[in-house]
Image (cartoon, rainbow, N blue to C red):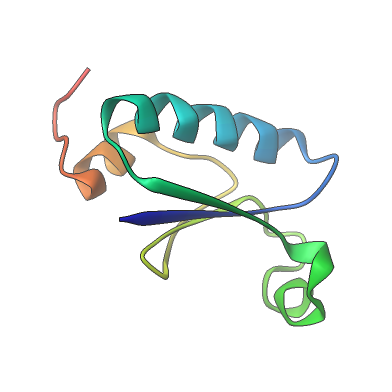
Amino acid sequence: MTVTLYTRAGCHLCEEAERVLRREQAATPFHLELVDIDRDPELVRRYGVRVPVVALDGEDLFDYEVPVDLLRARLGRVGAD
C-alpha cells in the first residue's frame, strides 16, 4: 500500500497529518510518500489551498485532517488501537 500526503511547506495541518500517518505506519506498514504540491503547477491547480490531502493507492481519501478510525478501516485495521 502507498499512502500519499499532498502537502506544502509551512502548513501546520500538513505537519499534524504527517504525525498521524507516521504513528499509524508504525502499526501497519505502508509506504508513505510526501509530495510538496508547490513543486508542481498541476498539483497546485488541482489542490490549491486544499491541503493536506491523503490518498491511498492514488485515491484521495481525506482533506485537511486524518480521521484515525477511517484511516485504520482503509488500512484494514478496523477497531485497532
On screen, residue 18 above or below 2: above
Q: Nearer the viewer, residue 79 or 29?
A: 29
- In the rendered structure, the answer to whether residue 50 lies left or right of residue 73 reads right
Residue 50 on image: x %, y %: 68, 59
- In the rendered structure, the answer to whether residue 68 lies left or right of residue 38 reads left
Q: Could you tell me which residue is drawn at 83 percent across and 45 percent down?
A: 9
Q: Could you tell me which residue is drawn at 78 percent across and 41 percent down?
A: 11
Q: Residue furthest top?
A: 81
Give the quarter of the image for residue 14: top right
Residue 29 on image: x %, y %: 30, 38
Residue 76 on image: x %, y %: 15, 43
On screen, residue 29 above or below 47: above
Q: Could you tell me which residue is drawn at 56 percent across and 27 percent down?
A: 19
* Quadrant of the rendering where the C terminus is positioned: top left
Give the quarter of the image for residue 46: bottom right
Give the quarter of the image for residue 1: bottom left
Residue 26 on image: x %, y %: 36, 25
How many numbered marks, from 0 up?
Answer: 0
- In the rendered structure, the answer to whether residue 13 lies left or right of residue 67 reads right
Q: Nearer the viewer, residue 46 or 6?
A: 6
- In the rendered structure, the answer to whether residue 21 lies left or right of residue 35 reads left
